[in-house]
């Protein structure tokens, strides 16, 4: 019984830690809107010279903005919502190690994706002509490298000098279950971002509009290989595998707890039937039903306590040795929750058989003996 509870505790501890870790990420805002946002994965630029590619991008932007169903557009490279593509770099030129995800953005990304600027401002077209390139960073970047300090209109080194003009709250474009990493958004002319277009649609535009939009894209790019995606659907699809994993782990945990409960019932019933003479003798000597029930509950609680102490000893090595990316406080919370769940389960499972044991009379126990 001690081994069963010990193993159940370790599994429950690991599952709760994993679920809490992922739910904390899930509850962190994405930082951009997905409802009424569409995205075009463009095609048709292979083999084109730069002038022809620029001309097609200009035509596409003009034709898209001429559509009454589209309010704003933003051109991006590979670091776009739910693309799975990422590029990062680091430097120690500022006197400390700095590493960040690099994201190319145009001047229209903030209003198209509803980014939240918490300090400073977003890019303007005039920033393209600045001597020192302008960047916008996210709150995670400031938290890691410049905590409790404003860097608006200040420069830092990231291979080259860059001036921070604004700070956005979040831009977790990799997905809702991905880590909120430090990020730097670099301003690019939309003609340099010939991979994706994010569309801010008017509210309530139906999927039937895709056919007309595909025709507009084909005429502008002279190619029919572009793909239109709904960002809200992409968000749901992006989290599907993670939700399935969480559900599977929760099912395993519930199944394991049920096995522990059934095992406890079996052991207690066997123990009670085997000890009926002892129960009858205690009652004959003056013990009441509450004393009998308390005895059996305390016995199983003590066994559970021994198993939990062994389990906690092994589990606590994980945060002490710092072997995972999980924050230490998450492990400690998981220890508390899993211990409480096991103790509650054991108490509930022990309560009913103990109450039944308390109803055994000396006459019944001696008769069966």
Image (cartoon, rainbow, N blue to C red):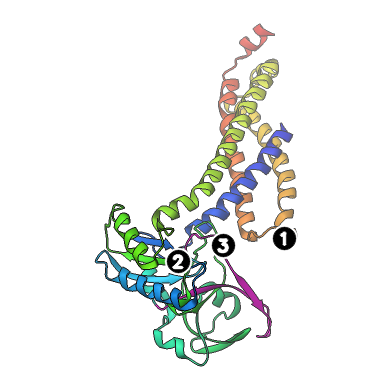
Judge whether residue 203 is colored magenta: no
Residue placed farthest to the top in the image? 367
Mark 1 lies on a secondary structure that is loop
Spot occupied by residue 363 in the image (x, y as percentages of width and height): 62, 10
Which of disc 3 and disc 2 is earlier in sequence? 3
Q: Is any atom of residue 258 visible in this view?
A: yes
Disc on res. 335: none
Residue wearing tag 3: 179
Q: Quadrant of residue 95?
A: bottom right
CA neighbours of label 2 inside 10 A, class few (<14), some (14 to 19), many (20+) = many
Residue wearing tag 1: 322
Q: Which residues are magenta?
A: 81-107
CA neighbours of label 1 inside 10 A, class few (<14), some (14 to 19), many (20+) = few
Q: Is any atom of residue 98 visible in this view?
A: no
Judge whether residue 89 is colored magenta: yes
How many numbered dots are placed on residues in this image?
3
Q: Is residue 278 above or below residue 36?
A: above
Which of disc 1 and disc 2 is earlier in sequence? 2
In the rendered view of the protein, which quadrant contains the C terminus? top right
Disc on res. 196: 2
Q: CA distance from mark 2 to mark 1?
A: 40 Å
Q: Residue at x 55, y 37 (%)?
A: 251
Spot occupied by residue 62 in the image (x, y as percentages of width and height): 32, 73
In the rendered view of the protein, which quadrant contains the N terminus? top right
Question: 116 or 61, which is in the foreground?
Answer: 61
């Amino acid at each position: 019984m001690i081994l069963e509870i010990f193993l159940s505790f370790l599994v429950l501890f690991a599952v709760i830690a994993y679920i809490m870790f992922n739910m904390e990420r899930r509850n962190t805002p994405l930082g951009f809107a997905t409802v009424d946002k569409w995205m075009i994965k463009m095609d048709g630029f292979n083999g084109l010279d730069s002038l022809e590619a620029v001309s097609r991008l200009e035509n596409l932007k003009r034709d898209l903005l001429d559509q009454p169903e589209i309010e704003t557009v933003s051109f991006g490279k590979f670091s776009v919502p739910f693309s799975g593509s990422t590029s990062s770099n680091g430097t120690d030129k500022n006197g400390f190690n700095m590493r960040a995800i690099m994201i190319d953005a145009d001047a229209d990304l903030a209003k198209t994706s509803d980014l939240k600027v918490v300090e400073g401002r977003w890019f303007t077209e005039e920033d393209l002509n600045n001597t020192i390139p302008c960047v916008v960073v996210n709150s995670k970047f400031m938290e890691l490298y410049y905590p409790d300090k404003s860097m608006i209109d200040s420069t830092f080194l990231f291979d080259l000098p860059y001036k921070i003009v604004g700070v956005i709250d979040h831009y977790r474009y990799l997905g809702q279950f991905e880590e909120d990493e430090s990020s730097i958004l670099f301003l690019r002319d939309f003609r340099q971002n010939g991979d994706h277009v994010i569309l801010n649609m008017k509210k309530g535009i139906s999927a039937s509009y895709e056919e007309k939009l595909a025709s507009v894209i084909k005429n502008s790019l002279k190619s029919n290989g572009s793909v239109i995606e709904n960002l809200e659907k992409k968000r749901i699809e992006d989290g599907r595998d993670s939700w399935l994993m969480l559900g599977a782990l929760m099912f395993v945990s519930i199944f394991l707890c049920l096995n522990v409960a059934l095992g406890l019932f079996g052991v207690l019933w066997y123990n009670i039937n085997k000890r009926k003479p002892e129960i009858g003798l205690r009652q004959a000597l003056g013990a009441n039903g509450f004393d009998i029930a308390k005895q059996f509950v305390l016995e199983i609680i003590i066994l559970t306590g021994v198993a939990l102490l062994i389990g906690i000893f092994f589990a606590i090595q994980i945060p002490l040795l710092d072997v995972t990316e999980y924050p230490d406080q998450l492990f400690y919370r998981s220890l508390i929750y899993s211990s409480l769940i096991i103790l509650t389960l054991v108490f509930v499972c022990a309560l009913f058989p103990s109450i039944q044991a308390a109803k055994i009379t000396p006459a019944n126990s001696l008769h069966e003996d």
